[in-house]
Amino acid sequence: MSINSNPLSAKILMYSTFIVILTVGMRAIAPILTTILFSVFAALILTPHIRWLKRRGIPGGLSVILVILLFAFIIAVLGVVVFGAAIQFEDQIPLYQTRLMGFIDILTRYIPSQGELSANSILRGIASNMIFLMSSIINGLLNAGTTAGIIILTTAFLLIDASNAPEKMNSELEAQSKLHMSMSKFDKNLVGFLVIKAETNLITAVGITVVLFIGGIDFAILWGVLIFLLSYIPYIGLVLASIPPIMLVLFKYGPVGALAIIVVIAIVDMLAENVVFPSLAGKGLKLSPGILFLSLIYWNYVLGTAGVLLSIPLTLILKIIFESFDETKWLARLMGPTEDIEENEKTESQKNKMAT
């Protein structure tokens, strides 16, 4: 018994030590690592567009240049619009805070207080935290200008090399068919997820932005960009991004208008996440809620706020790697939702019955 348990204990100790060292190392270089990861994911999202242009007969070099210019143009335009709107909104935050506190004072007149914990003090505390959170998010957007420039430059270099990446991989792995197939599957699944998730977030952001425009809500484009970015955060991302526009709707149309925009946001998110994304992504790109929550905590600890945005893609990378090799497929199944595990168990039992 001890002979078999010792190697297992040694392996657990070795893997645990490796994870701890890797975590500490990544946290030490978090600013550099974050820029590299955003650049890599941006390059992966844009690479299919280069291949699409090449299939249309446009030379490889020109395809890369066109995609890089388009990417830089979109970031520049959004940067100007978002930066200007963020500055204006930041200047008006004290005014919004005063109006929100006044609204709370009016609301709590009709709510009886119980001892020291009155409804007014509780709601004021919640409102103060909301204002602080909004201010932090806006400051984060304003401070991201330099980082965005570095990401664009790094992405450009990655895209230049990405046009020849398939040929390089084929030449290096042509004698290793199994590894070649695993790497091809890994690349295809990861790029597919990033593109599909970006499209889903874009549908959500555009839908909500259009509604805000129709309602005449200030800084609608700013909230759309914020919703697009924070929708990468599971469960809480859209909630955080929706707080500012809901607050503005509350000031303009009252509680009924705020409730209406909450319903609209919930419907758009439900359609995007439960209809569009599953139909495009398929079951292989799903993660269990427990894994999503743990990954959110882990990557936030390692990379800070940027790690929260990158938690799903980074965790999905691990799942795809585990799925690509027979020895670790069971880990990939554990990372998936419960229904996928049950389905795999039924498939395995059917195979065993047919074999016997």
Image (cartoon, rainbow, N blue to C red):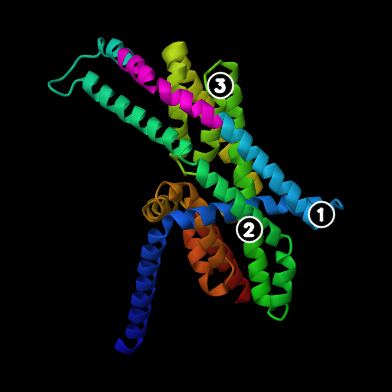
- Mark 2 or mark 1: name the one nearer the start of the chain: 1
**Location of residue 22 with respect to 213 vertically, above or below:** below
Q: Residue at x 72, y 66 (%)?
A: 166
**What residue span does the magenta drawing correspond to?**
82-102
- Mark 2 or mark 3: name the one nearer the start of the chain: 2
SS assignment for the magenta stretch, majority: helix
Q: Residue at x 62, y 63 (%)?
A: 186
Left or right of 171 in this view: 111: left
The secondary element bearing badge 3 is classed as helix
Q: Residues within 10 Å of mark 3 (few under 14, many from 20)?
A: many
Per the rendering, the mark at residue 355 is none
Which quadrant holds the C terminus?
A: bottom right
Nearest-to-viewer mark from 3 and 1: 1
The secondary element bearing badge 2 is classed as helix
Q: Image quarter for residue 19?
A: bottom left
Q: Residues within 10 Å of mark 1 (few under 14, many from 20)?
A: some
Left or right of 138 in this view: 211: right
Identify the residue position indicated by label 1 in the image.
54
Nearest-to-viewer mark from 2 and 3: 3
Q: Residue at x 57, y 35 (%)?
A: 79
Per the rendering, the mark at residue 189 is 2
22, 156: nearer the viewer: 156
Identify the residue position indicated by label 3 in the image.
212
Which quadrant holds the N terminus?
A: bottom left
**91 falls in the magenta region:** yes
Mark 3 is on which residue type? Answer: Leu
